[in-house]
Amino acid sequence: MFSLTACGGGGGGGSKDSGAVTPTSNAVVISSSVASSVSSSTVVSSALASSLSSNSYARSSIGQSSSSKSSSSAGSLSAITQLPIEVLSGAPGLIEPATILVKGAPSSASYLWLRTHRLTWREDGEFAMKFNGSVRPGSKGSVRLNGGPWVQLMNGNAAMSCEKHEAEYGCLNGTYMTVRVRVAIDALGSPGLKVGANTLEFRFDATDGVSSGWRVLAMDVRDANGQTLLTDNFVQDNPDDWEPPLNNPTDIAAGDVLWSRAALTDFGQTPIHGKCASCHESEGYDLKYFNYSNKSIIARSMFHGLSELQGKQIASYIRSQDSRLPQGVKISEAGRPWNPPYQPGPGLDAKPVELWAAGAGVDAVLESDSQMKDYMFPGGVYDPNRLGATGFLNPREMPQAFQYPDWSAWLPTIALEDMVADPSQLKPYDGDTAPANDQQNPLDRLKVATTWLEKFRFTKMESTTDSWYRRWGLYLIHVWGSSKWTVAQVLVCPAVRFSLAIRLLDQDKASPLMLGTPYACGS
């Protein structure tokens, strides 16, 4: 339970933006009825105040070894800002700085452009209402320039807008987890923009008890024509360079124990039954594979009531794991928290099958459905091998104008142990004979599915993968049909799928279709 949301962290529009580049769509301002309920600056609730005052991590750079670094000094023209900026903490209040270098005329600046991850309140990526039947009011994050006024990043603020594609999906109250936003330069107030080095600050304003922060993936200052005014001083954090914060056998072993046994709390410090391994892959490999930084793991550990030392031990345990990737493939080529798993896109099939779960990246998301024609009809030519009655239009390589959920959205928001009155009874059946379907708990169903997979997956697979895929899907529909455990099954299913997929990788017998295409679980 150490990623960006309760047991998990989001996606964004499909612009090819990466730093200072020209936008591909127009901004659309989203109004909201919550505007009147929000003041000009976010106020962290009194219930969080004591936590903020006692949590040194909330306003420091502890655990910052892999993100949110800005090597700069006032007026420096050689400042380097490392991306992403991770505004992640065990409690709201954290402020992270970044240096931008302005080369153009400040008077021509029109807006600050940001690509954000998990700035939305919809932590599960669904339309579930979080606050008295409506979207939670207020902002999760804010920004300010050179010590000026804080500007809340939320739909109700007319000074902020989303790019057209994300706006069509609800902007910051929609289904996307990576969202490109614009902030009017005028709204950032005095002292304003200046030539040379400028300081942007990003704040974690509030939590709904689920979220532990957000990220800035890219930033720019642009004029009315979308042209950048910045010198490119950005470097991308490289997971290949990450090391365990406590790189010794004792702390790594301690992190292993904490992962499966540590007593956790929710944000209100109420004890919960779930452990880290309850919501993640049993050994935490999902955090390794999707490259959650040391900082994010430490912050999430503290969010769940552990100490900074314990968070570092868990991060060290995750960092020390084998990448389980083919020889010569770097961990940086695997997933990232903001890149949607299984996102289709060109070139995916050419990668090792172990990378298919990482998807083609958020940049593979198209701006509109009409852009698909270039991929369906390359060169404007109809190809019967693609679109004919017996043709094959590869679903893994066909980009879409829709962003899939990020990895954290696949994870359960509540551990199975916290869904039952007596967690000690939540265990799979003994032996080889499963209880009747209507008597099975979620772990019974997992064992049934795993047993079936191990028994038939390799020994009775028919000549074509598609035929097996169909039988597998029909089987899951039958086993995971409606019952008293439906909700739990839906929540645990994605983690189950990832666990089964990794198990197959360990056996070196993974089906490309299995890892490359979402199946079952309503996906």
Image: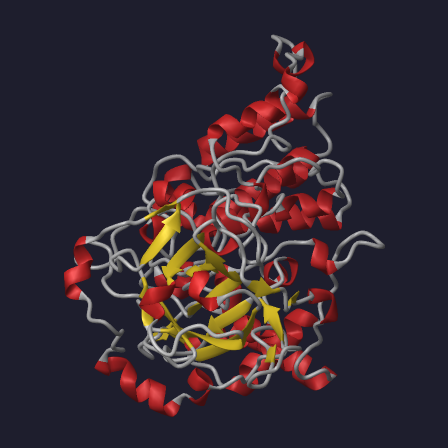
Residue 284 occupies quadrant: bottom right
Tell me if residue 393 comes above or below residue 453 in the rendering.
above
Residue 328 occupies quadrant: bottom right
* Colouring scheme, one of rainbow, by chain, secondary structure, one colour: secondary structure
Relative depth, front residue between 212 and 379: 379
Q: Position of residue 511 (x, y in %)?
A: 70, 36
Relative to 45, 165 lies left or right:
right
Q: Position of residue 382 (x, y in %)?
A: 64, 12
Relative to 277, 325 lies left or right:
right
The residue under the point 59% across, 36% down is 517
Relative to 462, 169 lies left or right:
left
The residue under the point 72% across, 82% down is 247
The residue under the point 39% across, 64% down is 423
Relative depth, front residue between 494 and 435: 494
The residue under the point 45% across, 53% down is 180
Q: Position of residue 1 (x, y in %)?
A: 48, 66
Q: Position of residue 213 (x, y in %)?
A: 42, 69
Q: Which residue in the rendered view is the most extreme toward the left? A: 36
Residue 212 occupies quadrant: bottom left
